[in-house]
Image: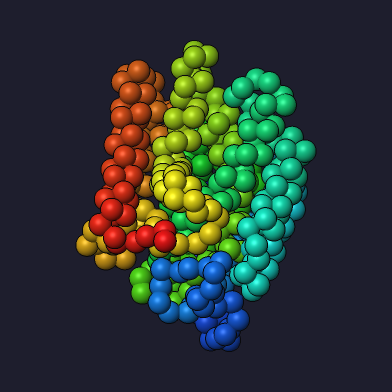
Amino acid sequence: MSLTWTYGWLGIAVFAFGLVLYHLLLKFLKSPGKKNQSGELLIRWSDQAKPTIGGIGFFVAFLAGSAFSGWLGLEALPQLPILPLVTAGCIAFLSGLYDDANNTRPVVKLISQAACALIIVFSGIEITILDMPIADRILTVVWIMAMMNSLNMLDNMDAVTSLVSTGVLVFCSVAMFWLGDGDSGIMALVISMIAVLVAFLRFNWHPSKMFMGDSGSQLLGLLLAVLAIPYGWNLARGFDVLTDWITAPLTIGLVFLIPLCDTTIVSINRLSHGRSPMVGGRDHTTHNLVYCGFKDQHVAMLYGALTVVNIFLAYQLSFGHNNRLWMIWLSVVYMLIVFFTLFVISRRNLSRGKYSYS
């Protein structure tokens, strides 16, 4: 059996397992992990309390994909060893699960994120764009922690984070095949995560039956941030040095445009009103679109469509060899349009009293 067929059967098996697992969890876990109670530290968009158990399926698929690659005898990539990724993933999941159950303070979450990032850096996985070891390692730690927070903050409306994360994983899988890494153990892990996310969408689409919770968003944020290092930041595009240096952050900006826009806009608005970016609220870009008349499922579809456009542009920017300068300018203009459109909408809603920081 070819490796492509093996990956296909792996994806089908994980998808089916995810459907069964989430169905059973909904049956047997009626009360644990419900994080919609009112409180100073937690403000959720949904009015209903729902179990935050999505991350459990992510973690099972994460471990299954890693174990399956070993069972197949697939070698880990030198630039992306599996063992440190699994170790950091366990910490991300468990710390998120603890937060789901106990609503821990933001500083506790930051400490666990820093621990995950340091494990990744000390294992030799780091961004090399600055060509200065210390600066590159600091950038790597900041990047991983930022994306773990961004995915966590974006998980504020049904299906949005699931769709965005699936798009990022699809881009990484394309980059892996383009670089000849399709027969690596990491590919089995990526296929498993895509399959479980698709299964999760069955229960996370509006009106959802469950949330992914911090256990899910922290694990996803870590995985996507780490995959983006060799297949985004350090992607060998083969152009001249200056073009490569410009294209790398633009590719990352496109692939992660939605979580980056959401986190940046929310942080600007909250800090300008003396509020901490780490405290929950109903002021995210997703919420602001609802204030403009969109329904929850329409916001998810819009962000899903934007994700498709983002991945397409990132693919053209990284792998295309024609009209390089034109693609760079198009990417910059597109990202600015998306960011400022969402920012202006948020400010307009704030001025009209759709939400407040008082």
Question: On screen, 120 above or below 212?
Answer: above
Residue occupying the point 37% across, 47% down:
307
Where is residue 15? Give x, y as percent.
Answer: 50, 66
Percent x, y of residue 199: 47, 67
In the rendered image, the vertical position of residue 189 relative to residue 177, given as above or below: below
Q: Image point 35% across, 18% down: which residue?
A: 325
Residue 230 figure quarter: top right
Tell me the colour scheme of the image.
rainbow
Q: Nearer the viewer, residue 202 or 266?
A: 266
Left or right side of 344 for 154: right
Left of 215 or right of it: where is 351? Answer: left
Q: Residue at x 55, y 31 (%)?
A: 233
Horizontal side of residue 64 vs 175, given as left or right: right
Residue positioned 46% across, 25% down in the render: 247
Q: Is residue 143 visible?
A: yes
Residue 1, horizontal then vertical, whole percent: 57, 52
| Left or right side of 32 for 331 | left
Instruction: Answer whether residue 177 is visible to the viewer in this image.
Output: no
Q: x and y percent of residue 53 in the render?
A: 56, 72
As drawn, the residue found furthest toward the left would be 293
Please state the total of marks drawn on the protein image.
0
331 over 353 or under it: above or below: above
**Which residue, as the protein is rendered here, is positioned at the far right?**
122
The image quadrant where one finds the C terminus is bottom left
Q: Which of the two residues, 257 or 67, is positioned nearer the viewer here?
A: 257
323 relative to 117, above or below: above
